[in-house]
Image (spheres, rainbow, N blue to C red):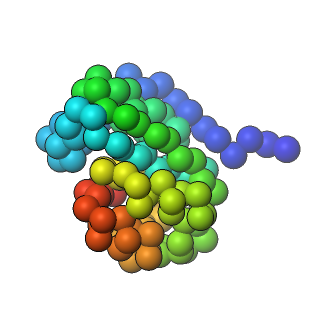
Amino acid sequence: MKSPFMMSDTAPLLKGAHKIVRDCAHIRPGEKVLVITDTGRDLAIACALMQEIMTIPAECTLCIMEERSSPGEEPPPQVHAAMVTSDVILQATTTVMAFTQAKKEACERGARMAAM
């Protein structure tokens, strides 16, 4: 079986990751940060974000899920659970999660979410 994962070099992505983490998401020390990606994206994106988050230092968790079949499809239950207990969620997935119940619940609990 062919692996669904691809990963290129993170080095070219680090400047952008710095901008997203520091300037856009304003992640602060000690925050619980969730990075969500899927099998349709290059893992280097999520890894570059995680590298930058860990320099803050913040607690970072990475979730990799199967690519959703359509925008707005709910994430798996374990990703949903991680979302509602996170302070910040960075979504680097192939389809948007903007209209999911998981995103709604996480934001109602105070999470900040950025999608790319």
Please give the name of the residue rendered at 23% of the width and 32% of the height, measured from the top-left corner.
29
* Count of numbered circles in the view: 0
Above or below, 2 against 82 in this view is above
Above or below, 54 against 96 in this view is above
| Residue 62 coordinates in the image, percent (x, y) | 49, 41
| Residue 106 coordinates in the image, percent (x, y) | 36, 65
Q: Is residue 93 at least partly visible in the picture?
A: no
Foreground: 55 or 23?
55
Task: Indicate the quadrant where residue 12 lies.
Answer: top left
Please give the name of the residue rendered at 44% of the width and 75% of the height, measured from the top-left corner.
100
Foreground: 76 or 30?
30
Q: Is residue 76 left or right of residue 83?
A: right
Image quarter hosting the C terminus: bottom left
Please give the name of the residue rendered at 63% of the width and 57% of the height, measured from the top-left corner.
66
Task: Indicate the quadrant where residue 53 lies.
Answer: top left
Please give the name of the residue rendered at 53% of the width and 74% of the height, measured from the top-left corner.
73
